[in-house]
Amino acid sequence: MSATATHRLTLPRLLAQDAIEGPPPLGVDLVPLLADAGLPALAARLDEPASRVLVISGDGDPTCHNNETVLRRAPRLVEEGLRQVDGVLRRSGQARPLAVAAETLAQIALIARYGPAWFRAIGTPEVPGSVLCTVHTGAGLPQVVETAAGTPVRTLLGGSGARAARAVLLGGVTGVWLPAPRALDTRWEPRDGSARVISMLPRDRCAVAETARVLTLAAPRCRGDVVRMVAALDDLAEPGAFDAVVRWSTQAAERVDDPPTHAASRLLLSALAAFPEEFEAHAGGRCAVEPMTGIEPA
């Protein structure tokens, strides 16, 4: 059976309630099961004492809607996963709570039901199983899709989205811009610290304005002066504005002590590299396109 056929037969998982059959298994030895499924870090977390379990319902990124979608479409899986985790929890009043994302709890429930080999049937050795991704195409509301790591970005955007793209933002407010030819052929693999979001920039939308919009969403998490950079992007024709943007993005990229600011500067640097002609036009007081609104919070 080809990898494509396997992908087609085994998805969706997380977002299909009819994929669950029968009562949940009891007495599952969860920690070694997760390790066998290729999730050793998660297994290690569950093997440490905790005072209680906290369900993470948000994604920490206003452009990402993965966990809220799981809670809305697969509450039974989340509840099953929570019970499985609670059953293996070594409680300690002195320990911190164990925070687990809703998507992860749903994955735990599926692994407990169908086993690690079934879970690893898709994905990659580094990112086994299926993962959720919020996809913004600039038209209508964002869509949360379930896929396997290694799926081309072109496939996730769909035919019309891929044809209309001139650039793609991979990773939401902690991501980077890539020109469409490079982005569409990229095989998407979620990275630690980067939101599972793909946002397409149509050919008739302003890249500078959209970069400013994303930085505005990122600003509340940053200690660096991101708000000042947004103001500069709003009027790059002001004396010194363009130089200030370039200087700040380069200097703030060294802020490893402040990951959100570091990510914001990396995003801005990627925009400068992906859209040099558009930034130069704005510096000259020219822009003939409107900002997109498709990746704003729903």
Image (spheres, rainbow, N blue to C red):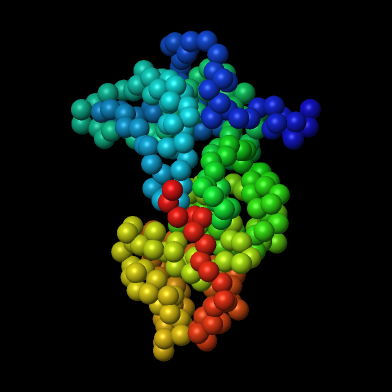
Residue 135, given in percent of the width and then of the height, sits at 56, 48
Asked whether the viewer can see residue 144, the reply is: yes
Residue 28, given in percent of the width and then of the height, sits at 46, 15
Q: Image check: 93 left or right of 101? A: left
Give the vertical position of 20 relative to 106 (above or below). above
Asked whether the viewer can see residue 251, the reply is: no
Quadrant of the rendering where the N terminus is positioned? top right
Residue 266, given in percent of the width and then of the height, sits at 48, 65
Q: Image check: 24 left or right of 5? A: left
Residue 108, given in percent of the width and then of the height, sits at 48, 26
Near-viewer residue (248 or 21): 21
Give the vertical position of 72 relative to 158 (above or below). above
Give the vertical position of 9 relative to 247 (above or below). above
Near-viewer residue (172 or 294): 294
State the residue lying farthest toward the left.
Answer: 93
- Location of residue 203 by image quarter: bottom right
Identify the residue shown where x is 57% and y is 76%. Answer: 288
Near-viewer residue (171 or 193): 171
Identify the residue shown where x is 53% and y is 22%. Answer: 17
Identify the residue shown where x is 42% and y is 31%. Answer: 71
- Location of residue 199 by image quarter: bottom right
